[in-house]
Image (cartoon, coloured by chain):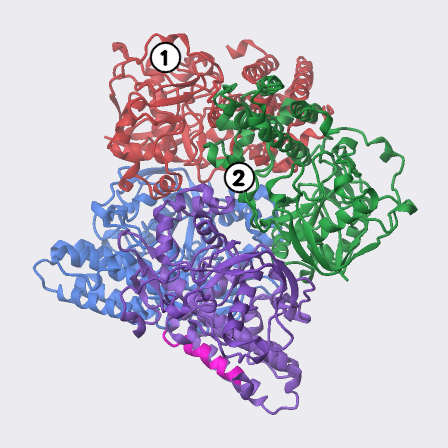
Chain colours: A blue, B red, C green, D purple
Amino acid sequence: MSGDRTLVSRVLDTRRKTSRLSEPLSAEDLVVQSMPDASPTKWHLAHTTWFFERFVLKPLGIAPVDASYDYLFNSYYEAVGKRHPRNKRGLLTRPPLEEVLAYRTAVDARIADLEGSSRLAEVAFALELGKHHEEQHQELILTDIKHLLGCNPLLPAYRPGRPADHASHASPPTAALGWRSFGEGVAAIGARGEGFAFDNERPRHKVYLAPFSMATRLVTCGEYLAFMADRGYERPELWLSEGWAWVQATGKGAPLYWEMENAKAPRIFTLHGEQALVPSEPICHVTYFEADAYARWAGARLPTEAEWEVAAEQSLEARYGPPERRPMAIKEGNFVEDGRLHPAPASTSSKTSGELMQMLGDVWEWTSSAYLPYPGFAPLAGAFGEYNGKFMINQMVLRGGSCATPRDHVRTTYRNFFPTNAEWQFSGIRLARDE
Amino acid sequence: MSGDRTLVSRVLDTRRKTSRLSEPLSAEDLVVQSMPDASPTKWHLAHTTWFFERFVLKPLGIAPVDASYDYLFNSYYEAVGKRHPRNKRGLLTRPPLEEVLAYRTAVDARIADLEGSSRLAEVAFALELGKHHEEQHQELILTDIKHLLGCNPLLPAYRPGRPADHASHASPPTAALGWRSFGEGVAAIGARGEGFAFDNERPRHKVYLAPFSMATRLVTCGEYLAFMADRGYERPELWLSEGWAWVQATGKGAPLYWEMENAKAPRIFTLHGEQALVPSEPICHVTYFEADAYARWAGARLPTEAEWEVAAEQSLEARYGPPERRPMAIKEGNFVEDGRLHPAPASTSSKTSGELMQMLGDVWEWTSSAYLPYPGFAPLAGAFGEYNGKFMINQMVLRGGSCATPRDHVRTTYRNFFPTNAEWQFSGIRLARDE
Amino acid sequence: MSGDRTLVSRVLDTRRKTSRLSEPLSAEDLVVQSMPDASPTKWHLAHTTWFFERFVLKPLGIAPVDASYDYLFNSYYEAVGKRHPRNKRGLLTRPPLEEVLAYRTAVDARIADLEGSSRLAEVAFALELGKHHEEQHQELILTDIKHLLGCNPLLPAYRPGRPADHASHASPPTAALGWRSFGEGVAAIGARGEGFAFDNERPRHKVYLAPFSMATRLVTCGEYLAFMADRGYERPELWLSEGWAWVQATGKGAPLYWEMENAKAPRIFTLHGEQALVPSEPICHVTYFEADAYARWAGARLPTEAEWEVAAEQSLEARYGPPERRPMAIKEGNFVEDGRLHPAPASTSSKTSGELMQMLGDVWEWTSSAYLPYPGFAPLAGAFGEYNGKFMINQMVLRGGSCATPRDHVRTTYRNFFPTNAEWQFSGIRLARDE
Amino acid sequence: MSGDRTLVSRVLDTRRKTSRLSEPLSAEDLVVQSMPDASPTKWHLAHTTWFFERFVLKPLGIAPVDASYDYLFNSYYEAVGKRHPRNKRGLLTRPPLEEVLAYRTAVDARIADLEGSSRLAEVAFALELGKHHEEQHQELILTDIKHLLGCNPLLPAYRPGRPADHASHASPPTAALGWRSFGEGVAAIGARGEGFAFDNERPRHKVYLAPFSMATRLVTCGEYLAFMADRGYERPELWLSEGWAWVQATGKGAPLYWEMENAKAPRIFTLHGEQALVPSEPICHVTYFEADAYARWAGARLPTEAEWEVAAEQSLEARYGPPERRPMAIKEGNFVEDGRLHPAPASTSSKTSGELMQMLGDVWEWTSSAYLPYPGFAPLAGAFGEYNGKFMINQMVLRGGSCATPRDHVRTTYRNFFPTNAEWQFSGIRLARDE
């Protein structure tokens, strides 16, 4: 449990995991940027390091490893100074990988030196934030490298070989789709006082919810195939106007990473390479437009983020008791630590019937809520205020974490957010409907 | 009062007003499209006519005036068929203006024939919708022609001469900015059962509101000048990230239609031509980005649409009693019928102190709410379902109507919506803050 | 003959013809701009007037009709000052048409006043240049309005009704394609000293030509259909690399203004409206890319401009004697004065066999020569130096004039020029080959 | 001399030089693409290998090393099949560098096996072409890596340290600018029958030249600084219209790789890193637009390619006798073998006065000739026909080779070609003028 470990050791532990994620990759893989939205792994390795250097070590008066890194590895903090343009991160063949790795080592050593320091308290929050920031980039390393490898005609695997549990079933059965009802009333959502949460999860506040029900599992690839077979991509009445324009402009007819050349045997690119599509696996890498169109076709809708959070909370509470008596570590779900790196079919065991499955892990679930400040939202002071608040426009909220998220990282109150046409994240669909 | 007039006569009345709006303009002015978002006046005249022909007359088996118009003047109804591309409406020099005016006359005659018809009930809703649709285009005629004339280096006036009441004061005083408080609790917003409302205003539903206060008047040009003088357009910390990118990409340093060549004597383009900027007039033609940045600079925020609606309702109720006993016609405010065609300074009379002023008319007020379906929203059946629902993404809600809106058209529950970078509408700023 | 008339009267005569061209059009037709490369007719009417005002009247100290016109109606003369952006000419609904027509009348009156003036000589060259400039815009009025009307789904005719001589033959026969040989040697091309010519036609200079032969007539629509039937638009080996990229990007499969919906009965949009394609008519509105690809498919090539000029000169000389003894007015060909406004089939009379037909008029003939300065080229002094010289890059030369060119305007030494993807001019194909 | 060595050994020798060029670079440097026009070094290494495999080994029935390479490493040969998009070459992190190097080794071994083969004659031309093709890519490796490193804020050197001869003079003197006259007449240009030449250099043919003179040396950085100081980038009258538009759109105020932050001490990025600008060094990395504007400012013009070739030939003949008695190896000039990798100041020794200096090597010299087929040009048969011919449009010819060109590669008849806005090649300026 996190409480047993010191902050410094937890940070260093997280840092080691980041480095480990880059191990299956060559220096060539690490340097290339496949599109403006994605960053090279090497840049992720350096930027997360810069974050500690800039916000933890510098305030303590510790000199930087290399003065040029402040320009090269700042992501978007206007308050901190000018920076290398985001869409040119892939041009940074220098500093070379070894230098970036040495940078990590040097900064880690300085962080380790803080253990027991009298000034630790001054930077404790920045250290904690840096750890969670590092975890976010762990997920981005996986989504970004998946995009890069997926652009390569050779379709190379990030980690070759299918996970053991997967190999046993060529195509596991699909769990029945159930619905769980929730009553109307005023509920509270948002992070409670105790424990780490991003500023965008606060303050906890009241919302009024009409009665609704929530699907017990995620939408599957098989169900999405039925939508496609029903000409889902050809019927404007199923789409938002902007979504329909996106379909026309891109010529889309299937989700990202799907290969439909042989329509009877669709294939799908994963971090383990290209594989036969498994109908019971959750649909993944869909845009908001696709999630919304699918829901309309299915006669349902996407949940709001408040509905999602209330449902997730009640579900956990029923099983494990109220949050204050619940160990934080209890998080069922398919996370990055499971090594599957791909969403998994919902369980078909009888005891799960009626229970909400796959709420955490597997795929980020698009909600119908725009990413906006909570009532009373106050951004963090200083440069940290740019962390979340300035992106609160023209994006939609996703909830629940994915198979590429560190288990420790996500919470039921966690708000992820992406523009409506983003598709390279592990983003999927859970249905809701009015009662 | 509308109840005294038949539906048909109200429709024809509204139609006449549309034609009247085009009278100060030449055939040349009427045909040109200044940007993809704006349409030529002639197209507005024809499209609104097509709306009645397609949705009222056709279902009754009445043959169209010209078969080609179905393609030329459909705006965006996918269910109805293919259509002329939106960004090419300005290429339609044919049919000529006289033919479009004859089209209006012919369709009006057929609508008039419906009076007393046994089949009127079948199309009553479409007629009513057509009337409100026509009113929306009345406003767009003004905003679109303003944009076209504003692109012309000669800066010609749509209607020359300043309104009489305005000429008397070179620069009227600015009303003091007050704040009115509203308590927390569950409130209901959205259109009640009786009376016309668009589908996007329904269903009426409950929301939870934390305590808040609302500014008693709109933000003025003078206040906005102070924001500019404080380097408002140069400080990234005041802007949303996407707004800052918009400032950088466009080089913006003042609102649309402002001429700052002589910074000490700013000028402003209006439908009456270019005039000296009046500090007490409400700021207008700002994007969401600018409204949001201004609010942050002012230490406040934009209201949510629920806050706005609750405040507007309570304000009206205090003055005129509950909605069911209130004549619909009671709408104070500066509307298109006032002929000013520009927002007016708030009253400085002592009896208004503490009261919410300018809630209706003057300028559409940006809210901090994304334009999304209300809980339980159901689009209208058939092609009318495309009227509002399919645009519910990546836009923000504006409330209250403007100086270009027909008085009859707007309601406290009315939801207007535009993308965050739209600036050619009469869009302004009202501040709110947490209590 | 021009020699019999005064310069002033010739100018005014030319000016009247310009006005006449706009007569079949409404004010609406005159104001709209269909693409950045094309200008509204009203703008052409004003700009040609401005040319005389700026370069003839102003040097004589005559005050301008309206000071704002200098900004509005300058086309591209940097030396003269700032100007309204080219791609926004279509936004100028003001000044209204009547004002532009009054502008023409006022300037014409001032030009008329120059007759007999002692200062006429000072501006004689500018007057002469203004006349030729006016003629160029006469052709542009026709090509630009054709483009605008061709964008309209109604496909309205500029001048309704087919010309009389055309109506008699639904489909006249195609003349046999002959080849005429020309020997090698040093020849001279370019304008001789006497008579008006643009600076880009000078100086006359020597070129060495290898033996070549020239097709006796233009390529026909029927021949081009054979190219299309042979999958001409689908075979990269027929195209320049940039031409192939243009085909891919535009999805082109037929020339501009062709309607192939019914492949067996192709239709073609003309200034007389849409009509059945006539196989014996010259192909028209092709880009350089298409002309070049067709020639390659036909086992031939395009002529160089030197070859074209030498062939045209020898051809004229054989018929009418050397240039110095040849009346300038002898110009056979289908020009704007013929009223056909569309290229005509080559004559099939036996006496033309072996003769070069259609060298002047009908269509501008793409040559394989880049538009570059002749050896010893010197641009005119002052602002007139911008007339031609600054465009000498990345364009190809066309020769011979078209059915939209004033007969008086073109010469065998005349160099027209357009980018390789221009298609809205009356541009066609004549083949050449090495001997 | 090449005659002493076998074709196979000459090919393998050239191949080794290519590999050597990549040695100072890391795998990271080799994989990245800095812009669509430039390719990653790894791609160059693979593509040149593919060229031999596809055009030499495949016709002999030798199986490919890896079937996927045909798709990955084809550049633009439509006749050979589909290929990886040019602008995505930088996404190919796989195959890894080692595999590409192994590919080179494998293909080299197979080429070596051809020595003494009875079938060598069948592929001798393809082998020879492959060698010259390989040399072209050697130059591109240098220009492309220079562009990539120049995009990096760290400005890393390709090869650190300044060449010895250079270090001795901080700033060597500038040779006087002389002019050499050439008389008028018919001359022949183009490749003679013997020896290798690209198809675009043939056939040798006659041209007529008016008298002209040619500058004895290249334009220097110091002279170009004077052009800049005279507001060269701010005066539209100096520029072609399209060039002026390019200046406006890009905001250009100095050549590529110039750093003018301290205007009194300009710096310049070279393959040896950033250095102080040396005024006597030839100006380099200018576009055609800049070369043309500079020449106009200097009261001169660019030479035609025929003038350049005649001048170069006469110059060589005067020194070394007629081409048939001249060893091919006699090529004075600063080529890639000299290791300078940057243009060098012209000699100031008295014996060079009046002689044409720097005609070969240093920088490619923009000519005023469009890149078009010579009279009688016939592209090579089959896929080789795509090598040059299909690019003959909208590009200008450059002559003479550069400091990045292999000495063996260039000829006086050699035609290089780039679009008018290309600046990443070693392209400079030599002036000419009419006599």
Chain at numbered mark 2: C
The dominant secondary structure in magenta is helix
Looking at the image, is D424 positioned above or below residue B346? below
D20 drawn magenta: yes
D132 drawn magenta: no
Circle 1 Cα neighbour tier, 10 Å, few/some/many (<14 / 14–19 / ≥20): few
Q: Residue flagged by tag 1: what amino acid is it?
A: Tyr
Q: Quadrant of residue A254?
A: bottom right
| Same chain? Circles 1 and 2 | no
Q: Which residue is mark 1?
A: B320
Disc assigned to residue C385: 2
Looking at the image, is C97 positioned above or below residue A320? above
Mark 1–mark 2 distance (CA, rounded to whole Å): 74 Å
Circle 2 Cα neighbour tier, 10 Å, few/some/many (<14 / 14–19 / ≥20): some
**Residue C153 position in % (x across, y down):** 69, 34
Q: Quadrant of residue A5?
A: bottom left
Quarter of the rendering occupied by the N terminus of chain C = top right
Residue in the foreground of this view, choosing between D43 and B366: D43
Q: Residue flagged by tag 2: what amino acid is it?
A: Gly
Residue in the foreground of this view, choosing between A304 and A23: A23
Extent of the magenta region: D10-24
Find numbered disc 1 in the image and state the secondary structure of the residue it sits on: helix
**Residue B244 position in % (x across, y down):** 34, 41
**Residue C304 position in % (x across, y down):** 69, 54
Quarter of the rendering occupied by the C terminus of chain C = bottom right
